[in-house]
Protein backbone atom coordinates (compact mmCIF):
# COMPACT_ATOMS: atom_id res chain seq x y z
CA UNK A 1 0.00 0.00 0.00
CA UNK A 2 2.70 2.52 1.04
CA UNK A 3 4.96 1.45 -1.81
CA UNK A 4 2.16 1.85 -4.34
CA UNK A 5 1.25 5.27 -2.93
CA UNK A 6 4.89 6.33 -3.13
CA UNK A 7 5.10 5.21 -6.77
CA UNK A 8 2.01 7.26 -7.59
CA UNK A 9 3.46 10.26 -5.71
CA UNK A 10 6.71 10.13 -7.70
CA UNK A 11 4.73 9.72 -10.91
CA UNK A 12 2.75 12.84 -9.97
CA UNK A 13 5.97 14.80 -9.58
CA UNK A 14 7.14 13.82 -13.06
CA UNK A 15 3.81 14.70 -14.68
CA UNK A 16 4.12 18.42 -13.86
CA UNK A 17 7.84 19.21 -13.92
CA UNK A 18 7.46 23.01 -14.05
CA UNK A 19 5.16 23.28 -11.04
CA UNK A 20 7.27 20.66 -9.24
CA UNK A 21 10.42 22.72 -9.82
CA UNK A 22 8.66 25.87 -8.64
CA UNK A 23 7.49 24.15 -5.44
CA UNK A 24 10.95 22.65 -4.78
CA UNK A 25 12.73 26.00 -5.24
CA UNK A 26 10.20 27.79 -3.01
CA UNK A 27 10.65 25.24 -0.22
CA UNK A 28 14.44 25.32 -0.65
CA UNK A 29 14.60 29.10 -0.25
CA UNK A 30 12.52 29.01 2.93
CA UNK A 31 14.52 26.14 4.39
CA UNK A 32 17.88 27.72 3.51
CA UNK A 33 16.94 31.03 5.12
CA UNK A 34 15.78 29.30 8.31
CA UNK A 35 18.71 26.90 8.56
CA UNK A 36 21.29 29.65 7.97
CA UNK A 37 20.03 31.63 10.96
CA UNK A 38 19.36 28.54 13.08
CA UNK A 39 22.87 27.19 12.46
CA UNK A 40 24.42 30.43 13.74
CA UNK A 41 22.09 30.46 16.77
CA UNK A 42 22.93 26.80 17.44
CA UNK A 43 26.68 27.46 17.45
CA UNK A 44 26.42 30.59 19.61
CA UNK A 45 24.22 28.88 22.21
CA UNK A 46 26.24 25.65 22.30
CA UNK A 47 27.85 24.30 25.46
CA UNK A 48 31.54 25.31 25.07
CA UNK A 49 32.88 22.42 27.20
CA UNK A 50 30.29 19.61 27.38
CA UNK A 51 30.52 17.80 30.69
CA UNK A 52 32.66 20.53 32.28
CA UNK A 53 30.88 23.85 31.76
CA UNK A 54 28.29 23.20 34.45
CA UNK A 55 31.07 23.04 37.07
CA UNK A 56 32.94 26.20 36.03
CA UNK A 57 32.32 29.65 37.51
CA UNK A 58 33.79 33.11 36.97
CA UNK A 59 34.51 34.85 40.28
CA UNK A 60 34.84 38.62 40.59
CA UNK A 61 35.52 41.01 43.47
CA UNK A 62 35.75 44.81 43.37
CA UNK A 63 38.77 46.27 45.18
CA UNK A 64 39.57 49.05 42.70
CA UNK A 65 40.36 52.39 44.38
CA UNK A 66 38.58 54.67 41.96
CA UNK A 67 35.14 55.78 40.88
CA UNK A 68 32.95 53.06 39.35
CA UNK A 69 33.60 52.59 35.65
CA UNK A 70 30.11 52.11 34.29
CA UNK A 71 28.94 52.68 30.76
CA UNK A 72 25.50 53.11 29.21
CA UNK A 73 24.23 50.80 26.52
CA UNK A 74 22.42 52.08 23.44
CA UNK A 75 19.02 51.77 25.10
CA UNK A 76 20.12 53.89 28.07
CA UNK A 77 20.49 51.03 30.57
CA UNK A 78 23.61 51.30 32.73
CA UNK A 79 25.70 48.13 32.71
CA UNK A 80 28.46 47.24 35.17
CA UNK A 81 31.66 46.37 33.38
CA UNK A 82 33.07 43.58 35.50
CA UNK A 83 35.09 40.65 34.37
CA UNK A 84 38.66 40.89 35.60
CA UNK A 85 40.23 41.34 39.04
CA UNK A 86 43.49 42.84 40.26
CA UNK A 87 46.59 40.68 40.54
CA UNK A 88 46.79 41.02 44.34
CA UNK A 89 43.26 39.64 44.67
CA UNK A 90 43.98 36.82 42.25
CA UNK A 91 47.07 35.81 44.22
CA UNK A 92 45.17 35.92 47.53
CA UNK A 93 42.31 33.82 46.16
CA UNK A 94 44.69 31.35 44.55
CA UNK A 95 46.62 30.97 47.80
CA UNK A 96 43.41 30.33 49.78
CA UNK A 97 42.41 27.62 47.25
CA UNK A 98 38.77 27.31 48.34
CA UNK A 99 37.65 25.60 45.11
CA UNK A 100 38.19 22.11 43.70
CA UNK A 101 40.39 23.68 41.02
CA UNK A 102 41.09 27.29 40.22
CA UNK A 103 42.98 29.40 37.74
CA UNK A 104 43.74 33.01 36.96
CA UNK A 105 44.21 33.90 33.33
CA UNK A 106 44.69 36.78 30.93
CA UNK A 107 44.84 37.13 27.19
CA UNK A 108 48.23 38.24 25.86
CA UNK A 109 49.68 38.95 22.45
CA UNK A 110 53.19 38.54 21.07
CA UNK A 111 55.27 37.63 18.08
CA UNK A 112 56.38 33.99 18.31
CA UNK A 113 59.43 32.58 16.60
CA UNK A 114 62.35 30.22 16.98
CA UNK A 115 65.18 31.46 19.18
CA UNK A 116 67.13 32.61 16.13
CA UNK A 117 64.12 34.53 14.84
CA UNK A 118 63.21 32.00 12.17
CA UNK A 119 59.62 31.13 11.17
CA UNK A 120 58.24 34.28 12.74
CA UNK A 121 54.52 34.05 13.57
CA UNK A 122 53.07 37.52 14.06
CA UNK A 123 50.14 38.51 16.26
CA UNK A 124 49.82 35.17 18.02
CA UNK A 125 47.31 34.85 20.85
CA UNK A 126 48.81 33.75 24.18
CA UNK A 127 47.15 32.85 27.45
CA UNK A 128 48.91 33.70 30.67
CA UNK A 129 47.47 31.39 33.31
CA UNK A 130 48.28 29.00 36.16
CA UNK A 131 49.06 25.31 36.44
CA UNK A 132 45.48 24.14 37.08
CA UNK A 133 44.08 25.64 33.87
CA UNK A 134 44.70 22.57 31.71
CA UNK A 135 43.18 19.88 33.97
CA UNK A 136 40.34 22.26 34.84
CA UNK A 137 39.42 22.97 31.20
CA UNK A 138 40.25 19.52 29.89
CA UNK A 139 43.05 20.69 27.61
CA UNK A 140 44.72 17.52 26.30
CA UNK A 141 48.47 17.21 25.94
CA UNK A 142 49.90 15.35 22.98
CA UNK A 143 53.54 15.50 24.09
CA UNK A 144 55.34 16.48 27.28
CA UNK A 145 53.73 17.82 30.43
CA UNK A 146 51.97 20.75 32.04
CA UNK A 147 53.92 23.08 34.30
CA UNK A 148 53.61 22.63 38.07
CA UNK A 149 52.47 24.88 40.92
CA UNK A 150 56.11 25.13 41.98
CA UNK A 151 57.03 26.48 38.52
CA UNK A 152 54.15 28.95 38.87
CA UNK A 153 55.62 30.19 42.16
CA UNK A 154 59.14 30.29 40.71
CA UNK A 155 57.89 32.29 37.69
CA UNK A 156 59.62 29.77 35.44
CA UNK A 157 59.90 30.73 31.74
CA UNK A 158 58.18 27.60 30.44
CA UNK A 159 55.36 27.21 27.92
CA UNK A 160 52.95 24.75 26.36
CA UNK A 161 52.25 25.33 22.67
CA UNK A 162 49.66 23.70 20.44
CA UNK A 163 50.64 21.15 17.84
CA UNK A 164 49.82 23.41 14.89
CA UNK A 165 52.21 26.12 16.07
CA UNK A 166 54.85 23.48 16.80
CA UNK A 167 54.67 22.28 13.19
CA UNK A 168 54.91 25.85 11.86
CA UNK A 169 57.98 26.61 13.98
CA UNK A 170 59.88 23.32 14.03
CA UNK A 171 58.32 21.19 11.29
CA UNK A 172 57.29 18.56 13.82
CA UNK A 173 54.56 18.19 16.41
CA UNK A 174 56.92 17.04 19.16
CA UNK A 175 58.66 20.27 20.14
CA UNK A 176 59.27 19.33 23.78
CA UNK A 177 62.66 20.57 24.92
CA UNK A 178 62.89 23.24 22.21
CA UNK A 179 62.86 26.97 22.97
CA UNK A 180 60.72 29.71 21.48
CA UNK A 181 61.01 33.48 21.48
CA UNK A 182 58.00 35.50 22.63
CA UNK A 183 58.77 39.05 21.53
CA UNK A 184 62.24 39.39 23.13
CA UNK A 185 62.02 36.69 25.82
CA UNK A 186 62.95 33.02 25.50
CA UNK A 187 60.68 30.29 26.90
CA UNK A 188 61.32 26.56 27.05
CA UNK A 189 58.63 24.32 25.57
CA UNK A 190 57.69 21.61 28.08
CA UNK A 191 54.47 20.42 26.45
CA UNK A 192 52.55 20.32 23.18
CA UNK A 193 48.76 20.36 23.33
CA UNK A 194 46.00 19.56 20.92
CA UNK A 195 44.32 22.70 19.49
CA UNK A 196 42.02 24.08 22.18
CA UNK A 197 39.01 25.93 20.83
CA UNK A 198 35.88 25.84 23.01
CA UNK A 199 32.93 27.23 21.10
CA UNK A 200 31.91 29.84 22.00
CA UNK A 201 35.17 31.11 23.48
CA UNK A 202 33.96 31.79 27.03
CA UNK A 203 36.98 32.44 29.26
CA UNK A 204 38.73 35.83 29.20
CA UNK A 205 35.85 36.83 26.96
CA UNK A 206 36.27 40.10 25.09
CA UNK A 207 32.99 41.70 24.13
CA UNK A 208 31.93 40.68 20.60
CA UNK A 209 34.80 38.19 20.22
CA UNK A 210 33.26 34.79 20.92
CA UNK A 211 34.59 32.76 18.03
CA UNK A 212 36.53 29.56 18.59
CA UNK A 213 38.84 30.55 15.73
CA UNK A 214 40.27 33.28 17.99
CA UNK A 215 42.17 30.72 20.04
CA UNK A 216 45.41 30.78 21.95
CA UNK A 217 48.39 28.88 20.59
CA UNK A 218 50.73 29.39 23.58
CA UNK A 219 50.00 28.81 27.29
CA UNK A 220 52.44 30.05 29.91
CA UNK A 221 52.56 31.16 33.58
CA UNK A 222 51.16 34.69 33.76
CA UNK A 223 53.86 35.76 36.27
CA UNK A 224 56.58 34.66 33.87
CA UNK A 225 54.83 36.56 31.08
CA UNK A 226 54.93 39.73 33.20
CA UNK A 227 58.63 39.23 33.91
CA UNK A 228 59.23 38.85 30.17
CA UNK A 229 57.55 42.18 29.45
CA UNK A 230 54.77 40.70 27.32
CA UNK A 231 52.04 43.28 26.87
CA UNK A 232 48.56 42.85 28.30
CA UNK A 233 45.83 42.94 25.66
CA UNK A 234 43.16 44.37 27.93
CA UNK A 235 42.09 45.43 31.40
CA UNK A 236 38.98 46.67 33.15
CA UNK A 237 39.08 49.34 35.85
CA UNK A 238 42.26 50.72 37.39
CA UNK A 239 43.10 52.40 40.69
CA UNK A 240 43.29 56.16 40.65
CA UNK A 241 47.02 55.76 41.42
CA UNK A 242 47.67 53.53 38.40
CA UNK A 243 50.43 54.67 36.04
CA UNK A 244 49.68 54.44 32.32
CA UNK A 245 52.08 55.57 29.61
CA UNK A 246 49.37 55.47 26.95
CA UNK A 247 45.72 54.66 26.42
CA UNK A 248 46.56 51.03 25.65
CA UNK A 249 49.10 50.61 28.42
CA UNK A 250 47.94 48.89 31.63
CA UNK A 251 49.47 48.89 35.10
CA UNK A 252 49.46 45.20 36.17
CA UNK A 253 49.70 46.09 39.85
CA UNK A 254 46.76 48.51 39.92
CA UNK A 255 44.40 47.38 37.14
CA UNK A 256 41.93 44.53 36.94
CA UNK A 257 43.38 42.34 34.19
CA UNK A 258 43.09 38.73 35.42
CA UNK A 259 39.98 36.56 35.06
CA UNK A 260 39.57 34.16 37.98
CA UNK A 261 37.78 30.88 37.24
CA UNK A 262 36.95 28.13 39.72
CA UNK A 263 35.65 24.58 39.49
CA UNK A 264 32.84 23.72 41.91
CA UNK A 265 31.16 20.33 41.70
CA UNK A 266 28.12 20.60 44.00
CA UNK A 267 25.51 23.24 44.91
CA UNK A 268 26.90 23.23 48.46
CA UNK A 269 30.38 24.08 47.15
CA UNK A 270 28.89 26.88 45.07
CA UNK A 271 27.07 28.34 48.07
CA UNK A 272 30.17 28.06 50.29
CA UNK A 273 32.42 29.70 47.70
CA UNK A 274 29.92 32.50 47.05
CA UNK A 275 29.80 33.21 50.81
CA UNK A 276 33.62 33.13 51.01
CA UNK A 277 33.90 35.52 48.07
CA UNK A 278 31.46 37.92 49.72
CA UNK A 279 33.43 37.83 52.99
CA UNK A 280 36.68 38.48 51.13
CA UNK A 281 35.16 41.50 49.37
CA UNK A 282 33.90 42.94 52.68
CA UNK A 283 37.26 42.43 54.36
CA UNK A 284 39.12 44.17 51.54
CA UNK A 285 36.59 46.97 51.59
CA UNK A 286 37.13 47.52 55.32
CA UNK A 287 40.91 47.42 54.98
CA UNK A 288 40.99 49.93 52.13
CA UNK A 289 38.29 52.26 53.41
CA UNK A 290 37.04 52.64 49.84
CA UNK A 291 33.90 54.75 49.35
CA UNK A 292 32.63 52.12 46.91
CA UNK A 293 30.38 49.42 48.37
CA UNK A 294 31.81 45.92 48.76
CA UNK A 295 30.87 43.87 45.70
CA UNK A 296 31.42 40.31 44.49
CA UNK A 297 29.88 38.10 41.82
CA UNK A 298 29.97 34.42 40.92
CA UNK A 299 28.75 33.54 37.40
CA UNK A 300 28.19 30.12 35.91
CA UNK A 301 29.34 29.70 32.30
CA UNK A 302 25.79 29.99 30.96
CA UNK A 303 25.10 33.09 33.08
CA UNK A 304 28.34 34.69 31.97
CA UNK A 305 27.66 34.03 28.28
CA UNK A 306 24.16 35.44 28.64
CA UNK A 307 25.46 38.54 30.42
CA UNK A 308 28.05 39.11 27.70
CA UNK A 309 25.29 38.91 25.06
CA UNK A 310 26.98 36.03 23.24
CA UNK A 311 23.69 35.43 21.43
CA UNK A 312 22.93 38.98 20.20
CA UNK A 313 19.33 40.12 19.86
CA UNK A 314 19.74 40.59 16.12
CA UNK A 315 20.58 36.88 15.75
CA UNK A 316 17.34 35.91 17.47
CA UNK A 317 15.43 38.46 15.40
CA UNK A 318 16.88 37.01 12.20
CA UNK A 319 15.71 33.55 13.26
CA UNK A 320 12.15 34.85 13.68
CA UNK A 321 12.27 36.68 10.35
CA UNK A 322 13.60 33.62 8.55
CA UNK A 323 10.94 31.47 10.20
CA UNK A 324 8.25 33.89 9.00
CA UNK A 325 9.68 33.69 5.49
CA UNK A 326 9.55 29.89 5.68
CA UNK A 327 5.88 30.05 6.72
CA UNK A 328 5.16 32.30 3.72
CA UNK A 329 6.90 29.82 1.44
CA UNK A 330 4.90 26.98 2.98
CA UNK A 331 1.63 28.84 2.36
CA UNK A 332 2.55 29.40 -1.29
CA UNK A 333 3.54 25.77 -1.79
CA UNK A 334 0.35 24.59 -0.10
CA UNK A 335 -1.71 26.67 -2.54
CA UNK A 336 0.31 25.37 -5.48
CA UNK A 337 -0.14 21.76 -4.39
CA UNK A 338 -3.84 22.24 -3.84
CA UNK A 339 -4.24 23.51 -7.39
CA UNK A 340 -2.16 20.59 -8.71
CA UNK A 341 -4.13 17.97 -6.83
CA UNK A 342 -7.57 19.36 -7.69
CA UNK A 343 -6.54 19.53 -11.35
CA UNK A 344 -6.48 15.72 -11.16
CA UNK A 345 -10.03 15.47 -9.83
CA UNK A 346 -11.18 13.26 -12.74
CA UNK A 347 -8.35 10.81 -12.16
CA UNK A 348 -9.02 10.78 -8.40
CA UNK A 349 -12.75 10.23 -9.02
CA UNK A 350 -12.07 7.24 -11.26
CA UNK A 351 -9.74 5.72 -8.64
CA UNK A 352 -12.39 6.23 -5.97
CA UNK A 353 -15.04 4.66 -8.24
CA UNK A 354 -12.79 1.63 -8.74
CA UNK A 355 -12.60 1.13 -4.98
CA UNK A 356 -9.62 3.17 -3.79
CA UNK A 357 -10.31 4.32 -0.19
CA UNK A 358 -9.92 7.92 0.88
CA UNK A 359 -6.92 7.09 3.04
CA UNK A 360 -5.06 5.79 -0.03
CA UNK A 361 -5.76 9.03 -1.91
CA UNK A 362 -4.69 11.02 1.17
CA UNK A 363 -1.49 9.00 1.63
CA UNK A 364 -0.50 9.38 -2.02
CA UNK A 365 -0.78 13.16 -1.99
CA UNK A 366 0.87 13.59 1.43
CA UNK A 367 3.81 11.55 0.16
CA UNK A 368 3.97 13.71 -2.96
CA UNK A 369 4.13 16.84 -0.80
CA UNK A 370 6.79 15.24 1.41
CA UNK A 371 8.82 14.33 -1.69
CA UNK A 372 8.66 17.96 -2.85
CA UNK A 373 9.98 19.13 0.52
CA UNK A 374 12.74 16.52 0.70
CA UNK A 375 13.91 17.60 -2.76
CA UNK A 376 13.70 21.15 -1.45
CA UNK A 377 15.91 20.08 1.46
CA UNK A 378 18.49 18.66 -0.95
CA UNK A 379 18.55 21.96 -2.82
CA UNK A 380 18.54 23.92 0.46
CA UNK A 381 21.78 22.22 1.57
CA UNK A 382 24.11 24.10 -0.84
CA UNK A 383 22.01 27.25 -0.43
CA UNK A 384 22.47 27.03 3.35
CA UNK A 385 26.22 26.55 2.94
CA UNK A 386 26.25 29.62 0.69
CA UNK A 387 24.33 31.63 3.29
CA UNK A 388 26.72 30.57 6.05
CA UNK A 389 29.70 31.46 3.88
CA UNK A 390 28.26 34.95 3.38
CA UNK A 391 27.77 35.27 7.15
CA UNK A 392 31.38 34.27 7.81
CA UNK A 393 32.54 37.12 5.56
CA UNK A 394 30.92 39.63 7.93
CA UNK A 395 33.42 40.65 10.63
CA UNK A 396 31.29 40.83 13.77
CA UNK A 397 33.40 38.78 16.19
CA UNK A 398 31.05 35.78 16.10
CA UNK A 399 29.84 35.29 12.52
CA UNK A 400 32.75 32.99 11.63
CA UNK A 401 31.06 30.46 13.92
CA UNK A 402 28.32 30.11 11.28
CA UNK A 403 28.88 26.52 10.21
CA UNK A 404 26.69 23.50 9.50
CA UNK A 405 27.61 20.78 11.99
CA UNK A 406 26.23 17.20 11.80
CA UNK A 407 23.37 18.04 14.18
CA UNK A 408 22.14 20.90 12.01
CA UNK A 409 22.71 18.87 8.84
CA UNK A 410 20.32 16.25 10.19
CA UNK A 411 18.03 19.04 11.38
CA UNK A 412 17.81 20.40 7.81
CA UNK A 413 16.27 17.21 6.45
CA UNK A 414 14.13 16.66 9.53
CA UNK A 415 12.73 20.17 9.05
CA UNK A 416 12.25 19.50 5.33
CA UNK A 417 10.24 16.37 6.07
CA UNK A 418 8.16 18.16 8.71
CA UNK A 419 7.47 21.02 6.28
CA UNK A 420 6.39 18.50 3.64
CA UNK A 421 3.94 16.80 5.97
CA UNK A 422 2.47 20.10 7.20
CA UNK A 423 2.24 21.58 3.73
CA UNK A 424 0.64 18.45 2.31
CA UNK A 425 -2.08 17.89 4.92
CA UNK A 426 -4.67 20.36 3.60
CA UNK A 427 -4.12 19.73 -0.14
CA UNK A 428 -4.16 15.96 0.43
CA UNK A 429 -7.36 16.20 2.49
CA UNK A 430 -8.99 18.28 -0.27
CA UNK A 431 -7.98 15.67 -2.83
CA UNK A 432 -9.36 12.83 -0.69
CA UNK A 433 -12.78 14.51 -0.43
CA UNK A 434 -13.36 14.53 -4.20
CA UNK A 435 -16.75 12.89 -4.96
CA UNK A 436 -16.25 10.00 -7.38
CA UNK A 437 -19.74 10.10 -8.89
CA UNK A 438 -19.55 13.69 -10.12
CA UNK A 439 -16.08 13.23 -11.54
CA UNK A 440 -16.93 10.02 -13.38
CA UNK A 441 -20.06 11.63 -14.82
CA UNK A 442 -18.13 14.70 -16.01
CA UNK A 443 -15.42 12.50 -17.49
Image (tube, rainbow, N blue to C red):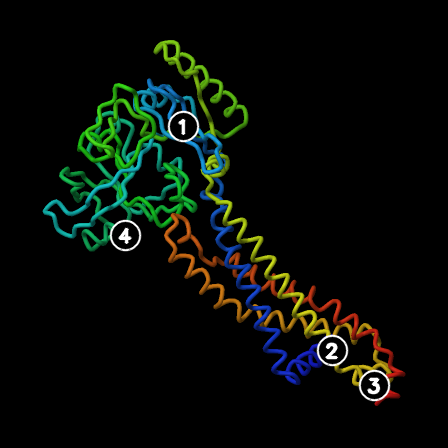
Distance of label 4 from label 1 (alpha carbons) = 40 Å
Q: Identify the residue shown where x is 46% and y is 25%.
A: 297
Instruction: List x then y, in percent, for residue 393.
Output: 38, 58
Q: Mark 1, residues whose alpha carbon is within 10 Å: few (<14), some, or many (≥20)?
A: few
Seen from the viewer's position, the closer of residues 21 and 156 is: 21
Q: Mark 2, residues whose alpha carbon is within 10 Å: few (<14), some, or many (≥20)?
A: many
Q: Earlier in the sequence, mark 4 or mark 1?
A: 1
Instruction: List x then y, in percent, for residue 53.
Output: 47, 38
Distance of label 2 from label 1 (alpha carbons) = 63 Å
Tell me if 300 is positioned left or right of 68 in this view. right
Q: Which structural element holds mark 2?
A: helix
Q: Earlier in the sequence, mark 3 or mark 2?
A: 2
The C terminus lies in which quarter of the figure?
bottom right
Q: Mark 3, residues whose alpha carbon is within 10 Å: few (<14), some, or many (≥20)?
A: some
The residue under label 1 is: 70
Tell me if 88 is positioned left or right of 245 in this view. right
Q: Are marks 2 and 1 in contact (CB under 8 Å)?
A: no
Q: Are marks 3 and 1 in contact (CB under 8 Å)?
A: no
Distance of label 2 from label 4 (alpha carbons) = 58 Å
The residue under label 4 is: 164
Q: Are marks 4 and 3 in contact (CB under 8 Å)?
A: no
Tell me if 143 is positioned left or right of 384 in this view. left
Residue 17 visible, this orientation: yes
Residue mark closest to the camera, 3 vs 2: 2
Residue mark closest to the camera, 4 vs 1: 1
Distance of label 4 from label 3 (alpha carbons) = 69 Å
The residue under label 2 is: 341
Amino acid sequence: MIRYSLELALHGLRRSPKSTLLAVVTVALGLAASMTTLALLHMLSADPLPGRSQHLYLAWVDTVQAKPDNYASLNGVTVENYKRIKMADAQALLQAHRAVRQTALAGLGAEVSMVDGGHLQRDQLLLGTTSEFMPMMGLALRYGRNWSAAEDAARAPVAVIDVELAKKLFGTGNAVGRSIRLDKAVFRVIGVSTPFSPSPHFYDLDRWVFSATHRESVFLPYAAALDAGIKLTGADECDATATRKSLFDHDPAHCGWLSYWVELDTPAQVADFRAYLSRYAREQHQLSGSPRPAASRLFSVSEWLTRQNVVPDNVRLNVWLAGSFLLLCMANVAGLLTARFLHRSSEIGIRRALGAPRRAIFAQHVLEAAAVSVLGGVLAWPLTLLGLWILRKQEQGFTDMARLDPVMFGGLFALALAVGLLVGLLPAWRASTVEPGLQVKSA
